[in-house]
Image: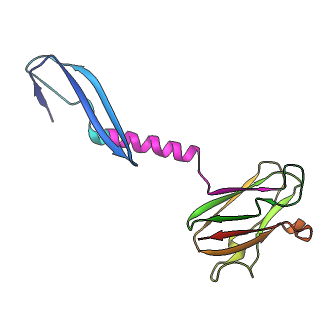
């Protein structure tokens, strides 16, 4: 659409709300008197830019409800922390730290009814520092897990999903 303007300088201003944050854009725009001009930006364009920007930030820095280290900083065999509580739908990250190899195996006798322990387990060994696996927990209850090669040494943990 075209608009007619009669002043020489106007302030173009737009405000959009995206994910609870207001975004305002103001810029001087020179136009000739009594001349039809096309708008330079639209609210839809601003919204699209905000969506792309927010998606880029979310993909670049995922947020986890908790991060559990596999192996202590001093080489102890264990999960650190070994007991956490998260909300339904949240994701937990397991990060290989020290004294590896490690894995994360959920105990079929210690998961909520209807949860397939094999499907949420990570039986392949994490062999290097910083290697990661994640789990999203959608079913409330208590989840017991352990590290297969170090279970006898007491490397086990608990996640409570509320």
Task: Give residue 23's position: percent from left, percent from top.
Answer: 35, 38
Q: Is residue 36 magenta?
A: no
**Residue 27 shown left or right of residue 36 in the figure:** right
- Residue 111 in which image quadrant: bottom right
**Residue 117 shown left or right of residue 7 in the figure:** right
Q: Is 24 drawn above or below residue 79 in the view shown?
A: above
Q: Residue at x 82, y 48 (%)?
A: 129
Task: Give residue 114's position: percent from left, percent from top.
Answer: 62, 82
Task: Give residue 131's position: percent from left, percent from top.
Answer: 76, 51
Q: Residue at x 76, y 70 (%)?
A: 145
Q: Residue at x 41, y 45 (%)?
A: 51
- Residue 93 in which image quadrant: bottom right
Q: Is 66 drawn above or below residue 22 in the view shown?
A: below
Q: Quadrant of the N terminus?
A: top left
- Residue 4 in which image quadrant: top left
Residue lying at the far right of the rendered structure:
153
Q: Residue at x 92, y 71 (%)?
A: 152
Q: Which residues are magenta?
A: 46-70
């Amino acid at each position: 659409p075209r608009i007619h303007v009669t002043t020489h300088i106007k302030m173009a201003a737009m405000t959009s709300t995206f994910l609870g944050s207001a975004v305002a854009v103001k810029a001087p725009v020179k136009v000739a008197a009594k001349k039809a001009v096309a708008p330079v930006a639209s609210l839809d364009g601003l919204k699209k830019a905000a969506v792309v920007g927010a998606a880029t930030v979310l993909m670049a820095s995922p947020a986890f409800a908790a991060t559990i280290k596999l192996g202590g900083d001093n080489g102890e065999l264990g999960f650190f922390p070994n007991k956490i509580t998260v909300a339904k739908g949240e994701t937990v990250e397991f990060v290989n730290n020290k004294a590896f190899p490690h894995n994360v195996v959920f105990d079929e006798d210690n998961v909520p009814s209807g949860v397939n322990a094999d499907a949420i387990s990570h039986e392949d060994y994490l062999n290097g520092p910083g290697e990661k696996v994640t789990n999203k927990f959608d079913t409330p209850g208590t989840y017991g897990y352990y590290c297969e090669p170090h279970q006898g040494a007491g490397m086990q943990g608990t996640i409570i999903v509320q």
